[in-house]
Amino acid sequence: MEVLYDHQIFELQKIGGISRYFIELIKYNPSAKFTVKYTDNVYLLSNELKKYNIISNKEYYDNFLINYSFKGKGRLLRYYGKLLKRSQPELSIKYLKESDFDVFHPTYYDPYFLSYLKNKPFVLTVHDMIHELFPQYFISDKNTVINKKKLILSANKINVNSECTKNDLIKLFPDVKEKITVIHHSCNFKQLEEILPKEKYILFTGARGGYKNFNTFLQAAAPLLIKYDFNLICTGHPFNNEENILINNLQIMNRVSCVFASENQLVELYSKATAFVFPSLYEGFGIPILEAFSSNCPAILSNTSSLPEIGGDAAIYFDPNSIDDMRTQIEHVITSTTLQNELIKKGKEQAKKFSWEKCAKETMEVYKKVIS
């Protein structure tokens, strides 16, 4: 059985949960066909996928006009890269027209492929319904909702990553209920056996804008950082002006830092943190929860969307709209070594319920159903 995956998410993401998910499906499917030619996605450029012979922007830079150095070389290279990327939809369409595959699995919601599928089935993965449920955070992005709806109604089968996403999808599109299969995702961290000594910091990972609820979390955590002489470490892009102003107003400038961490560095940050806090208003799955569990890091989570489903009884939960409740639960964890150790133990067991191999095998079963 040959499955065709397209280019979409690998043009949109240099790093991120959706592209990581598709990489895992491709790894466990040796007969997969893949229509990505130019990319800077870190997963595709890793040693584990060298067989796809993908060229990165860095490699272009190292070999682009190699004997010349001049102002604007980087801008010229980026323009050159954009021209090359135009060939990726063309490559996808070429494979679709050739029709030499059994199942098509698009990696995002652009419906460009519908007119080229002929009678071939396609499986759609819906990662969350956040654009539909929180439109106020996506005012400038109306196409995602329109495109996703078109594909949801057209797909032969729909995979979702949690019961939460399934329920949200059915509320909005009740007629597709019978097409849905829940297949949990996983994370790529190996479980750490040794529990490292904890340092006095709270960890926040990933994006911070909008529904990620970072500013509310800052207001909840600030008094605790001061009271208990703790730091807050964030990962991802540098703080923006609004965040810097809030950090300054809360008088925690010397206690808050932001780093762009590699996967190995992220494991270390989780493993040494006193606690990881995930205050998001909505998540379709929540890979960082499993990252924390695998790294022996106590997790304190929002009690919304899929987070209780993924965290189970291995986490402490709070109302993400309540600064007081969030602060109370964080304080409860960071002041109790006994509770921290209990959460670490439960987290290790909870993490064992999820694996990419299981996800891939269950996905293969869905593929088989659409061609039977």
Image (cartoon, rainbow, N blue to C red):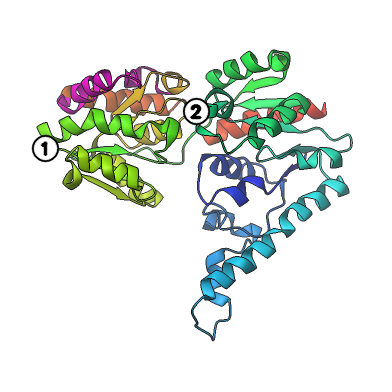
Q: Mark 1 points at which residue?
A: 229
Q: Which residue type carries mark 2?
A: Phe
Q: Where is residue 341 in the image (x, y as percent from the top left)?
A: 22, 26
Report which quarter residue 360 is drawn in: top right
Q: Relative to 240, say whether 80 is above or below.
A: below
Q: Where is residue 34 in the image (x, y as percent from the top left)?
A: 71, 50
Q: Main secondary structure of the magenta part?
A: helix
Report which quarter residue 276 is drawn in: top left
Quarter of the figure with the N terminus = top right
Residue visible at 42% across and 25% down in the picture: 281
| Of 200 and 229, the residue lying toward us | 229
Q: Name the residue under label 2.
A: 285
Kindly state the secondary structure of the residue where label 2 is placed. loop
Q: Earlier in the sequence, mark 2 or mark 1?
A: 1
Quarter of the figure with the C terminus = top right
Q: Position of residue 83 (x, y in %)?
A: 68, 64
| Of 141 and 201, the residue lying toward us | 141
Q: Which residue type carries mark 1?
A: Asp
Magenta-colored span = 310-337
